[in-house]
Amino acid sequence: MSEPGNQRPEQGPPEDDPPDELLEEMGLAAEVYERLAARGRELRFRLDPPTGRVTVEVRDLDGKLLYTIPPTRALEIAGGEDLDDV
């Protein structure tokens, strides 16, 4: 028998479904991913340790780095702006 202070809480059922707003954003991200993939591109995000800044890399589907873009440009693309230069 375990002591009352050492009991672990029981695992209940999973929380409610994610909010609709989150599901909508996930759907939008999936659409952007598909549009980029159709053009043979993908975005990779990484944190640059020395500066603490986010670097956004545009790569081909084989992983070859094509160029980098500012994080603000990645947000514009995510918002549905033109992908011509990506």
Image (cartoon, grey):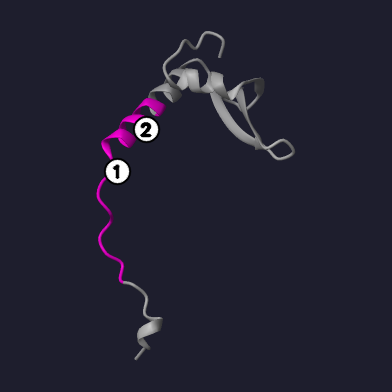
In percent of width and height, residue 85 lies at: 56, 10
Q: Under tag 1, what secondary structure?
A: loop
Query: Is 49 above or below relative to 39?
Result: below
Look at the image and tell me in which quarter the C terminus lies: top right
Q: Which of the 4 image quadrants contains residue 50?
A: top right
Q: Residues within 10 Å of mark 2 (few under 14, many from 20)?
A: few
Magenta span: 10-29
Residue at the far top: name it. 84
| Label 1 with label 2: CB-CB less than 8 Å | yes
Query: Is 47 above or below relative to 69?
Result: below
Q: Residues within 10 Å of mark 1 (few under 14, many from 20)?
A: few
In percent of width and height, residue 46 lies at: 62, 35
In the foreground, 34 or 73 = 73
Q: Which numbered marker is on residue 26? A: 2
Instruction: Using the numbered discs, state the Cα–Cα distance from disc 1 to disc 2 in whole angstroms.
Output: 11 Å
- Residue depicted at 61% across the width and 21% down the height: 70
- Residue depicted at 66% across the width and 23% down the height: 65
